[in-house]
Image (tube, helix red, strand yellow):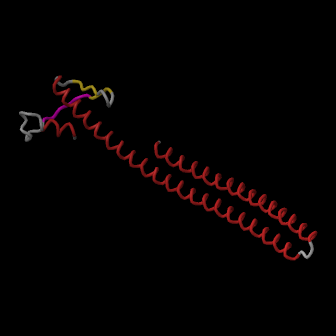
Amino acid sequence: KEVSRFISSVPGNGGNNPIDIIAKISGTADNPKIAGLTSSLTDNLKEAAKEKINEVKEQAKEKANQIIKNAQKQADAIMAQAGKQAANIRSEAKKQGQRLISEAGKQGNKLISQAHNPIAKKAAEISKHEFIKKAKQQANNLNVQAGKKANNIINTAKSKSDKIVIDAEK
C-alpha cells in the first residue's frame, strides 16, 4: 500500500497511472533489500520504508512515555496517601503519649493534694515522679511502635509504587 502510494507520486508518473512492480523484499526492517529494481528506485523505496518505520517507532515511544507518565502519577498518589497515613499514625501516638503523661501528672497532683502530713506529701511527690516516668516510657513505646507501623506503610507503598512504574516501563 505504502509502496503503491509512493510509486504513484514518482515524478513522471503523474499520479494517475499506477505502476505494477513485482519485487522481492528481503533483509531486515532497518536495512531492507529489494531485488529486481533500479538503484534509485530501490533507494527511494528503502527511504519510504525507513520513514514509515521511524514514524511507527515514534508513535510507540510516545505511547510508552504516556503509559510511564500515568504510572508515575499513580505511584505518586500511592506514596502521598501512605505519607498521610504514616503522619496520622505518628501524630495519634504522640497525642496518646501526651495524654498518658498528662494523666500521670494529674494523678500525682491528686495524691499530693490528699496528703496531710509532710512525709505523706513527700511520698506522693515521689509517686508522682514515678507515674510521670512510667508514662513517658509508655509514650516512648507508643511512638516507637507507631514509627515502625508508619515505616511499614511507607515501605509497602514504595514497593507498590516501584512495581507500577517498573511494569509500565516494560
Q: Quadrant of residue 61?
A: top left
Q: Is residue 27 above or below residue 3?
A: above
Q: Position of residue 116 (x, y in %)?
A: 91, 76
As drawn, is 108 to the left or to the right of 60? right
Magenta residues? 19-24
- Pick whichever, 64 or 155, lies toward us: 155
* Residue 105 within the segment the image draws in magenta: no
Q: Quadrant of the N terminus?
A: top left
* Residue positioned 33% across, 28% down in the render: 28
Instruction: Identify the residue at the far front of this view.
Output: 118
Q: Residue at x 25, y 35 (%)?
A: 51
Which residue is rendered at x = 49% and y = 47% of the image? 165
Q: Give whichever of 11, 152 is nearer the camera.
A: 152
Q: Quadrant of residue 41?
A: top left
Q: Per the image, is 21 magenta?
A: yes
Q: Foreground residue, 154 or 25?
A: 154
Q: Tell me residue 133's x, y (percent).
A: 81, 60
| Quarter where residue 18 is shown | top left
**Taking 72 as reference, is 132 left or right?**
right
Q: Position of residue 123 (x, y in %)?
A: 91, 67
Q: Is residue 95 left or right of residue 131?
A: left
On the rendered structure, is 131 left or right of 116? left
Name the foreground residue: 44 vs 106: 106
Q: Residue at x 69, y 62 (%)?
A: 93
As drawn, 7 above or below 160: above
Residue 81 coordinates in the image, percent (x, y): 54, 59
Principal SS element in the magenta part? loop
Q: How many marks?
A: 0
